[in-house]
Image (cartoon, coloured by chain):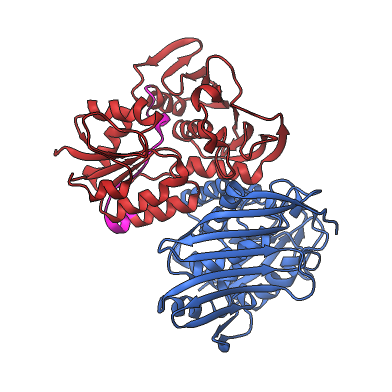
Chain colours: A red, B blue
Amino acid sequence: MMTIRLGLVGVGKIAHDQHIPTIAASPDFELVATASRHGSVEGTPSYSSIEEMLDGPETIDAITLCQPPHVRYDAARLAIASGKHVFLEKPPGMTLGEVAALAEQAETAGVSLFASWHSRYGAAIDDTRAWLAGTTIHSVKAIWKEDVRVWHPGQEWLWEAGALGVFDPGINALSVLTAILPRRFFLTDATLEFPENRAAPIAADLTYVDTAGVPVAAEFDFRQPGPHTWEVHAETAAGTMLLAKGGNELWIDGVLKTTAPEAEYRGLYDQFARLIAAGKSDADTTPLAHVTDAFLRGVRVPVEPFHY
Amino acid sequence: MMTIRLGLVGVGKIAHDQHIPTIAASPDFELVATASRHGSVEGTPSYSSIEEMLDGPETIDAITLCQPPHVRYDAARLAIASGKHVFLEKPPGMTLGEVAALAEQAETAGVSLFASWHSRYGAAIDDTRAWLAGTTIHSVKAIWKEDVRVWHPGQEWLWEAGALGVFDPGINALSVLTAILPRRFFLTDATLEFPENRAAPIAADLTYVDTAGVPVAAEFDFRQPGPHTWEVHAETAAGTMLLAKGGNELWIDGVLKTTAPEAEYRGLYDQFARLIAAGKSDADTTPLAHVTDAFLRGVRVPVEPFHY
């Protein structure tokens, strides 16, 4: 297979932490250009905008977009219109409408659109899905709690009206639940806590039920000091399951069953390469639909102001 | 074609105003039973619940659900599990998750699920779609304003947390826009007005853009005294378009081009019969996704209390 020549837009924290080292180690991709207002990658041609990158001399087959979501649609639309395959960081858009529009555009243009959910590529996700399919589930609870000051230092955009707030990590939990559970689930109750000085929630308490009547709960909180908690707990006929470390460790009745070095972004880029080779798209918006459902249904509770 | 034996669940205002007379006049359907806590139809066996109706002696092929949406999922699930085709009044569910679950269940069960949008069956909808497809659109604006005291007298459920408020009629506008416009559109700005004593919005101001960059706006208001306004205005290269009376009159440059007696529910039941005959479902949730997007993105503004 030919190496896929990749342009990277948005050289910030997630690009440096994950995309750039993963692309460097991937057999499928070669980073040929970046576009970012401030960031760049040493040794790679850098531009200040996607428009300039597309006008540059480098041949680009595919583009990864990892800017904040509120500026991602226009970039994605331009990339697809230029015939490039597109990898969208999560969340794939500011609205379901945006993503539906991009999916339609990509199909018409004959390019691959990948709405990525990195937590679905945790080392223990596949084993967890298989294990849950083989037992009777009594109840499920996802707990995603972390310190926003550590994980999103100074990121004011996360708190603007229309931003996800605690659903930015919480959508990872929803991407995991929708990947590992055997049946669809839907929201029956939701409480969202909004700091008095912010337009996005800092915590959420969500009650779901699956189509067999099994209770599924989720708790998200941005105010946890110290180590983060990214876990799914399930009580089942075959014992107590814990999916820990955001999808990277499967424990049954206190015994570690599956683990491996965390390699979520390698999994994402492998999938992006497969999609391009197969001429397909993967733009599942189910996790985002669960988030919009929570904003529609949720009771809003004001809580104390949040400042970085 | 065999007559489809129909059970009707929820004998309230919309059932009396629309469903019962339409079913009586339809060549495809025969009303064989009703289920309702309070209502009934003279000459038709009546039950107090869907469970009792399903246990009764009448053979039922299909069920229409027109109770308030917060009790509709359980009824729909039971109806599908009993092998009945299901007609859902709008909105089709309290969440996107509910409707996705029902669609999957219906597909597995091999029955037809119809998520109905009555305004898409206005007399002028098809002509409007065709007319807009033949011109260049400069801008679009939907105005859906009515007096909630007239259209939803005393309906407290409409104002509970998770209920749609003004989006209950507003979703009709979105069902029309998604039916007549040639391209997808998505939300870029939203303001929702919430009465201080209510958990659902009384008015909304929505700004969309379509995938070609054409501005699309929508204004919903529950506080309009006197006659209601259910209109879509468009400025185009071929003149000024007005789709009036909720989709039943098409005017171009002030000249009435299409009208016919309002027959939206006849159109819905004709479509339901076609779906059953073809073994297909029609469960488009695009209008509901636009509503959830507005709750996710919308800036909330408190306004004066509302009392019936």
Using the image as rendered, state which of residue A159 and residue A138 is in the foreground: A159
Q: Quadrant of the N terminus of chain A?
A: top left
A122 in relation to B140, above or below:
above
Judge whether residue A68 is colored magenta.
Answer: no
State the residue at coordinates (33%, 53%): A78
The extreme left residue here reads A2
Give how far across and how far down residue B194 sits, in percent.
73, 51
Q: Locate residue B252 relative to residue A113 in the image: left or right.
A: right
Res B187 visible: yes
Q: Quadrant of the C terminus of chain A?
A: top right
The extreme right residue here reads B308
Q: Quadrant of residue A206?
A: top right
The extreme bottom residue here reads B255
The extreme top residue here reads A255
Give how far across and how far down residue B239 sits, in percent.
49, 83
State the residue at coordinates (26%, 46%): A53
Q: Locate residue A155 relative to residue A49 in the image: left or right.
A: right
Magenta stretch bounds: A106-123
Give how far across and how far down residue A43 sits, in percent.
21, 30
